[in-house]
Amino acid sequence: MPRQRTVRSDDDHRLDKPPAARHTSAMTAATRSDLVADILVVGGGMGGLATAIALARGGFSVLLADEQAPATTTDPGFDGRVSAIAHASCQLLRAIGAYEALAPYGQPILDIRVTDGRPGEKPSPLFLHFDHQAIGDEPFGMILENRHIRLGLMAVIAGIPSIRVLAPVRVVGTERGTAGAIAHLADGRKIRARLIVACDGRASPLREEAGIRKVAWDYSQDGIVTTVEHELPHQGVACEHFLPSGPFAILPMTGNRCSLVWTERRELTPALMAMARDAFDVEMRRRLGDGLGAARSVGPRFAYPLAFHMATRFVDRRLALVGDAAHGLHPIAGQGLNLGLRDTAALAEVLADGARLGLDPGDDTLLDRYERWRRVDSVVMGSVMDGLNRLFSNDAMPLRLARDLGLAAVERLPGLKKFFMHHARGTVGKLPRLLEGKPL
Ligand SMILES: Cc1cc2nc3c(=O)[nH]c(=O)nc-3n(C[C@H](O)[C@H](O)[C@H](O)COP(=O)(O)OP(=O)(O)OC[C@H]3O[C@@H](n4cnc5c(N)ncnc54)[C@H](O)[C@@H]3O)c2cc1C
């Protein structure tokens, strides 16, 4: 049955619910006989949604399977986080035709401020300040609510006939051979594809099934996330305030709101999560400072366990790992999703180039090229984020002094400072075409 195209309505401009009718029609249309596509993307998180779109733009037919229903993953109680989307990732969103759906909900990041201190004390006078105008007109990126990213990407997918969405369905196993791949669903159905892309998150059942090992450790820290309303405008400034328990990120949202990612020692999390709002706000303000005027938390609190992992391989026969399935970082600089979008862009480029030469998307040489391109960048980024967290989640005097001097040195060395600013914008290294805003 052909996929139904729906005329755009005013509702499409408001990202407050998933395009339910279009998803439902896609689900009921996917009968036993038509579960065939060039590429199966397993996992409909932000990474899987963006990957499905990028691959479809590369000319492939895509089946996107997620074990959770869109109505669940876009519920306001599902994911209270925002994401700092770097400039290069914004370029990717532009190139795959998703930027217009998302940009109205984004807060541009104009400045980044890095400070060091203790709760209740003024930050150290030696701090770093990045102004986007020092390296061009474009902001460092934008802050978007994860819920809006999911809704926006789902709305784009609903308009692409070559993507079919199956959700909720769970992939329980795969058979991958020289002739093709088959994914088995929990309901007994099968999907046939040339390549399976695992966007199935940190626990990645597909990575485990393929026997791909990972290097992993836990930080014994949680990221407590909540939204704060404040009196004074934030001027688009994102702050990373380093406290002894870990980084305290203040991410500007639209309006006079910001999202906090408060890194805390895990043993303190239950008490902070259970605190009455007034008591929580007292603790919150001791860390936030008074630069934004009167401030109070609004909405629910969320706690995310923080851990590191890096897969030892990113590919297997007719299988590619993308996003958190391949790597998971400390959110100290908001790089996890950005790194995953670099995987998406590189994979889409390698496969589209291969298709121009008549190669099968599951071809080993293409997958090897993807692996070579992405592993080194991921290991470097993961190591830097890990090192920064260890250096800054510590109150020992020699370390405090060393990092304050380090911040001051970067602040005073224009070349080094610009280098860090280009990193924040994600415009360093050999960029896939999509990250430069170019088509595949
Ligand atoms: C506190 C915090 C703040 C962060 N802030 C930022 C930030 O500012 N910027 C940034 O770039 N990154 C940030 N990150 C990281 C970012 O959130 C993640 O890297 C990103 O969400 C990973 O997306 P993903 O699609 O790879 O995986 P996931 O979001 O985990 O999606 C995996 C999907 O796979 C599905 N799935 C799993 N198994 C199966 C199966 N067997 N069958 C079918 N479906 C399956 C699941 O239902 C799920 O939808 C942050 C992380 C944390 C913890």
Image (cartoon, rainbow, N blue to C red):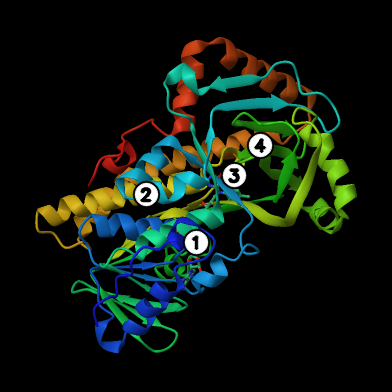
CB atoms of marks 1 and 3 within 8 Å: no
Asked whether residue 66 appears in the rendered view, the answer is yes
Please tell me the numbered disc located at residue 343. 2
Please tell me the numbered disc located at residue 390. 4
Q: Residues within 10 Å of mark 4 (few under 14, many from 20)?
A: few
In which quarter of the view is residue 78 placed? bottom right
Q: Does the beta carbon of the residue at mark 3 sit less than 8 Å from ligand 1? A: yes
Where is residue 326 shown, x and y percent of the image?
A: 44, 55
Is label 1 in a helix, a strand or a loop?
loop
**Residue located at (45% from left, 56% from top):** 13
Is label 3 in a helix, a strand or a loop?
helix
Residue kind at label 2, given as amino acid type: Asp
User: What is the CA distance from the residue labelled 3 to the residue labelled 4?
Assistant: 13 Å
CB atoms of marks 3 and 4 within 8 Å: no
Look at discs 3 and 4 and give the one toward the viewer: 3
Q: Which residue is mark 3?
A: 331
Whichever of labels 4 and 1 marks the residue nearer the N terminus, that label is 1
Front residue of 145/180: it is: 145
- Asked if residue 414 is positioned above or below residue 292 in the image, the reply reads above
Q: Residues within 10 Å of mark 3 (few under 14, many from 20)?
A: many
